[in-house]
Image (cartoon, rainbow, N blue to C red):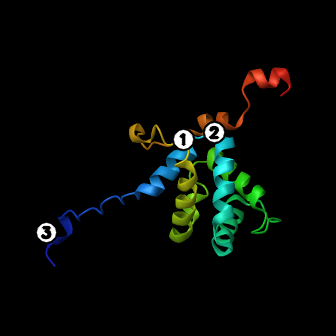
Amino acid sequence: MSLMHFLRKQPEEPAPVERHELRQYRYLLRTASPEALDALHLDALLVLDPAVRAIILRTAQERLQTGRDLTVDDIHRLARLMTVAEIRTPGVLVSGLVDIAHERLARAVLRQAAQTDLLDGYDTWDGVDPDLATSARRLSPPPEQLRRGA
């Protein structure tokens, strides 16, 4: 081999293109209220096959180190766990899902979201995930609710 072979710049792999429905789901995870996400996740989990719910549950248990007592039928608690995890640490759960579970979850969530105005800002979204401080504030009640004791 010649020295030129070693000096040649190797072509870089192109960045993977995010599928449209996965990007829309990620948009919802980053912009929708926790209450809206809880409802979307709950509705999605209700229609997903128990095998897909099992994949989601197992991924949540492994990545979050919590929810060990949950089963595939604990849909309300799993929906809340998914919402809180993705708001606190964007991508922590969905990035660990196998493609088929991620795609089916995204499609099920988007079917419900299409009936709302939650996707209205999607076309102008830059795709950037919020920083952790911004994410944490989404889970905290507004100060006026704390004062009222709501």
Q: Earlier in the sequence, mark 1 or mark 3?
A: 3
Quarter assignment of residue 57 = bottom right
Find out whether the residues at labels 2 and 1 contact each other: C-beta distance under 8 Å: no
Residue indicated by mark 3 = 4
Mark-to-mark CA distance, 2 and 1 = 9 Å
Q: Nearer the viewer, mark 1 or mark 3?
A: 1
Q: Residue 116 falls in which quadrant of the image?
A: top right
Amino acid on which the number 3 mark rests in the picture = Met
Most foreground residue, 109 or 144: 109
Provide residue 4's location: percent of width, then percent of height.
13, 68
Q: Earlier in the sequence, mark 2 or mark 3?
A: 3
Q: Tell me what residue is drawn at x 36 percent, y 58 percent.
A: 17
* Relative to 122, 137 lies left or right: right
The kind of secondary structure element at disc 2 is loop
Q: Is residue 40 above or below residue 71?
A: above
Local SS, label 3: helix
Q: Going 72% across and 64% down the picture, which residue do you hit?
A: 61
**Which residue is labeled 2 in the image?**
33
| 23 sits to left or right of 30 | left
Type of the residue with mark 1: Leu
Which residue is identified by label 1?
A: 118
Q: Residue at x 54, y 55 (%)?
A: 111
Residue 70 in percent (x, y) is at 80, 65
Task: State how far apart marks 1 and 3 are (Cα).
Answer: 54 Å
Instruction: Give the camera-side residue of 115 and 132.
Output: 115
